[in-house]
Amino acid sequence: MKKYTEEENKILDSIEAGEWNSVANVKDELAKAKMAAMATTTKNKNINIRVTEADITKLKAKSVEVGIPYQTIVSALIHNYTTGKISLAV
């Protein structure tokens, strides 16, 4: 008999307790999961944007305050916006 890890045993117990339900359309859910997996493994792309000198200066100052590159801050902002974690007020 195969030995399972603690996490695997918890999952098996949960399934056996009836805590899991089938999805209505397996093909759609599988397609969504595949798209999400591909999106997380895609390579970074370079982009060019126009930013005012004042904004880039402030951004660089903030990046020094938090100790991370300003490019990482821009990337995190874009990611958080595209995943719906933040919204844009124009």
Image (tube, grey):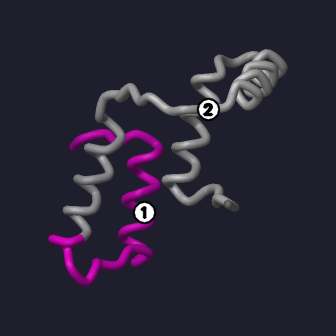
- Residue 40's disc is none
Residue extending farthest left: 27
Tell me: 64 left or right of 25.
Answer: right
Q: What stretch is highlighted in magenta?
A: 1-28
Between the C-alphas of marks 2 and 1, the distance is 54 Å
**Amino acid bearing label 2:** Val
The structure residue drawn at horizontal position 29% and vertical position 34%, both measured from the top left corner, is 42
Q: In the picture, residue 11 is in which quadrant? A: bottom left
- Label 1: element kind: helix
Image coordinates of residue 34 in percent, x first then y, are 23, 53
Q: Residue 13 carries which label?
A: 1
78 to the left or right of 12: right
Residue 86 lies in the magenta-colored region: no
Quarter of the figure with residue 90: bottom right
Q: Where is residue 65 in the image (x, y as percent from the top left)?
A: 84, 20
Closer to the N terminus: mark 2 or mark 1?
A: 1
Mark 2 packing: few (<14 Cα in 10 Å), some, or many (20+)? Answer: few
- Residue 21 lies, in percent from the top left, at 35, 78
Q: Name the residue under label 2.
A: 51
**Residue type pointed to by label 1:** Asp
Q: Which of 49 and 85 is in front in this view?
A: 49
